[in-house]
Image (cartoon, rainbow, N blue to C red):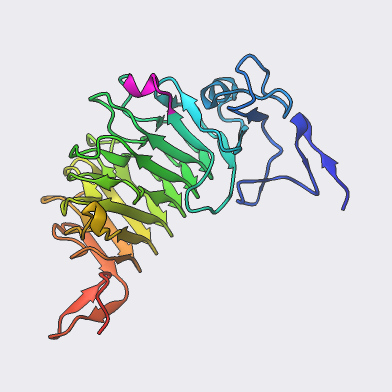
Amino acid sequence: MTLTNFPNGVSSFGIPIMGGGGIPAMYGDVWFVDYANGSDNNDGKSLDSPFKTLSQAHTKATTNKNDIILLNGNGTHYQEASMLTWSKNRIHVIGLGTFGAVDMQPEIQLSTAGNLTDSAATIKVTGYGNTFTNVYITNAGTHANSVTALWDAGENNVYTNCQFAKFSDLNVAGVSHVEARGDTSTFRRCKFGVDWVTMAAARFGLLIKGTGGSARMKHNIFEDCYFVVASSSANYEHIHVYDTSSLAFGNIWKNCVFNNALISSASAAAIDDAVNSVSGLVEGSLFFVNCAANSTSFSTTTNQLTTVGMSMNGGADTAYVNVAITPA
């Protein structure tokens, strides 16, 4: 097969494929971003003239055109001066790092000055039909309003092979790695959290938090995702529903793992519950299929929460569904 040259400096033996999803990258424009070697004064249209920041690529991309943004994963962290609000539609971000790695690259974070700003998240997604593939979104903000790494608040957006982590406020209750109120969001092979820093409060991996109506999480699917933590607080939860206005319709977790690292030197021990709903929830549901956790129990507050999967007998005729046990 001969080398084919496509517009904007993209070459491939055949048709370039977008993010492993089998979609040819040919309809919209292709934008190149390289934080280490680029400049936002460049035109971003070739490997030789890349932008420096993701925010500049978002500014230049055309909404609803299926533009593609390629991030060079060369080990340099991509930084933003403040929260990037992703308001455009049908734009596709692909990190060209080590695809499938435990800690995905490239990493997108706030700058040192950005960590001091009134930024709720590193990226807030409010647009429609965007995809994010193979990127690592982190947040080390210290402002009182810094609460999460990703704020998912759009519609029909897809995250594939991504990781999310809020590194700061380890002892502050209520913050999360992802805050979710998106409509029809899909997360595939994503990782929520890290286990090399120790949480010390009732924090959350995924906080489902909305205000009712269209501003609540609904129709979401999580498939083959990992939720990880090292926590000295037994009150950490991988998934938490904030209140009865935060969730609607059916939401599914399939083949997900909820793991808390047991590290004596870091005082990281078992957490009480992997997942908790909220009392009085009647408008939405949480359905867990073939999931596994090593928490003390899978869930205590189970309103509108159901689970199906492998059941193991822990002795004395006690059955544990989705919760790991120490083998006899």
| The C terminus sits in image quarter | bottom left
Q: Nearer the viewer, residue 74 or 31?
A: 74
Note whether residue 284 is visible: no
Depicted 78 relative to depicted 273: above or below: above
Q: Would you place residue 241 above or below residue 58 in this image?
A: below
Position of 32 relative to 11 (above/below): above
152 within the magenta span: no
Which residue is found at the position 60% from the left and 46% from the top?
A: 19
Could you tell me residue 6's position as x and y percent? Answer: 79, 36
- State whether residue 305 appears in this view: yes
Location of residue 141 (image quadrant): top left
Question: Along the horizontal axis of the image, is 93 left or right of 278?
Answer: right
Q: Could you tell me residue 163's position as x and y percent?
A: 44, 46
Where residue 314 appears, x then y in whole percent? 19, 80
Total labels drawn: 0
Looking at this view, name the residue that lies furthest to the top. 41
* Residue positioned 68% across, 41% down in the render: 25
Q: Is residue 114 magenta?
A: yes
Q: Is residue 100 left or right of residue 5?
A: left
Furthest toward the front, the residue is 265
Q: Residue at x 54, y 39 (%)?
A: 106
Q: Residue furthest right?
A: 2
Q: On the rendered structure, is 3 left or right of 231?
A: right
Question: Which residue is depicted at the point 31% across and 46% down?
Answer: 197
Q: Whole-percent x and y of residue 226?
A: 39, 56
Q: Which residue range is magenta in the image?
A: 110-116
| Near-viewer residue (95 or 278) | 95
Where 318 falls versus 228 (above or below)?
below
